[in-house]
Image: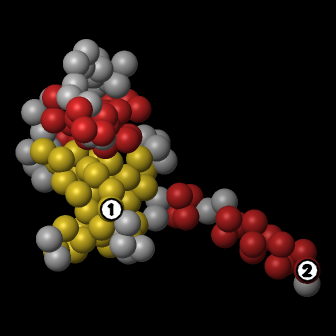
């Protein structure tokens, strides 16, 4: 019986669904589903389970902007988003922590750290 318990525990820990988890974040009181996409090692809006502008941007491997505004302790990852002409959105996680996302014209979101990691 203990082997069965270990097998179940092992399958839960290494389940692909666990790595593709989604949670409800809020923005101005409005719910937004945010999901972890392990292939990009980042959080994306649920609409990006398929194709979206945020995923397309990361897959194109853009060149890192040479100058960004770092004054006043600004988040460099968020500043990269702005340097490409996109808006920065701040969402609250279910644990009430804030996380910055880059918002694309189609409404798709990617966390700014994933965007920064994708740049060459």
Going by the image, does 107 lie left or right of 7? left
Residue at (14% x, 71% y) in the render:
28
Q: Which mark is residue 27?
A: none
Q: Is residue 47 above or below residue 6?
A: above
Q: Is residue 68 above or below residue 27?
A: above
- Residue 61, picture quadrant: top left
Q: Is residue 65 above or below residue 1?
A: above
Q: Which mark is residue 98?
A: 1
Q: From this viewpoint, is residue 10 visible?
A: yes
Separation of marks 1 and 2 at Cα, in angstroms: 41 Å
Mark toward the start of the polypeptide (1 vs 2): 2
Residue 118 locus on image (x, y percent):
37, 30
Count residues near mark 2 (Cα–Cα under 10 Å), then give few for <14, some for 14-19, many for 20+: few
Residue at (75% x, 74% y) in the render:
8
Q: Residue furthest front?
A: 72
Tell me the quarter of the image containing the N terminus: bottom right
Q: Residue furthest bottom?
A: 1
Residue 114 locus on image (x, y percent):
38, 40
């Amino acid at each position: 019986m203990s082997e069965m318990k270990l097998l179940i525990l092992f399958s839960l820990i290494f389940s692909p669904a666990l790595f593709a988890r989604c949670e409800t974040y809020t923005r101005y009181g409005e719910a937004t589903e945010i999901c972890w996409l392990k292939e990009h090692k980042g959080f994306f809006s649920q609409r990006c389970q398929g194709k979206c502008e945020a995923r397309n941007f990361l897959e194109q491997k853009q060149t890192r902007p040479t100058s960004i505004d770092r004054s006043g302790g600004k988040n460099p990852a968020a500043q990269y988003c702005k340097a490409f002409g996109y808006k920065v959105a701040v969402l609250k996680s279910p644990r009430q922590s804030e996380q910055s996302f880059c918002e694309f014209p189609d409404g798709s979101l990617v966390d700014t750290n994933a965007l920064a990691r994708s740049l060459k």
